[in-house]
Image (cartoon, grey):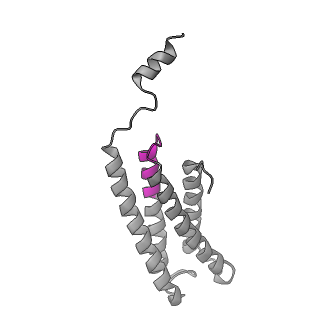
Amino acid sequence: MNKHINFEDNIFILNVKVRMIHDLFILETDPELFLKKTIEDIDFIDDTLGLLLENLSENVHLIERNELFDNLSELERQFSEALTFFLTSSGNISALRFPALREKIVFLRTHSLTRKKTIDDMRNQSAGVAIDPLVSFSELSELLKEY
């Protein structure tokens, strides 16, 4: 990944992918056309959510960190709901029609719930921590002296 990560855009795109997958489970889509790609997309989302969490947790000086944790937590909730729908629905792409995928989806859902708990814990921890200013009061005074 790049040094600079645009968390907002990445979360937005993943959100769109999760909604699309959830819609795919609701609609009567043809599994011969969409199942393989859907499973690949689910794996991609799972991996990417893990990377975003890792990078966000390491970036303690990010100004809007708590808001990003909120967005990431909401995205995890939606992802978990989509996986739950896969497990409980009777659509063309579902665990009912493809029982061999059940174990994988249960694992991914558990992984998502664990990440969500981690995100919520980190958000709560960082909410109580005061962020040190990037420029101290004396540095700011010195910079503004010339004006």
Which residue is rendered at x = 50% and y = 15% of the image? 144
Instruction: Tell me where residue 63 appears, x and y as whole percent.
Output: 46, 40
Please name the predominant secondary structure of the magenta segment in the image.
helix
Query: Residue at horizontal 32%, vertical 43%?
Result: 129
When the figure is inspected, residue 111 is found, relative to residue 66, above or below; the finding is below
The answer to whether one can see residue 71 in this image is no
Task: Check if residue 1 falls in the magenta segment.
Answer: no
Where does residue 94 sit, x and y in percent of width and height? Answer: 52, 81
The correct choice, above or below, for 104 with respect to 51 in the image is: below
83 vs 93, nearest the viewer: 83
List x then y, in percent, for residue 65: 44, 46
Q: Which residues are magenta?
A: 60-74
The residue closer to the viewer here, 114 or 130, is 130
Is residue 30 or residue 64 the one in the foreground?
A: 64
Horizontal side, residue 117 vs residue 106: left or right: left
123 vs 4, nearest the viewer: 4
In this view, the residue farthest toward the left is 128
Does the segment drawn in magenta span residue 67? yes
Residue 24: x and y in percent read: 59, 71
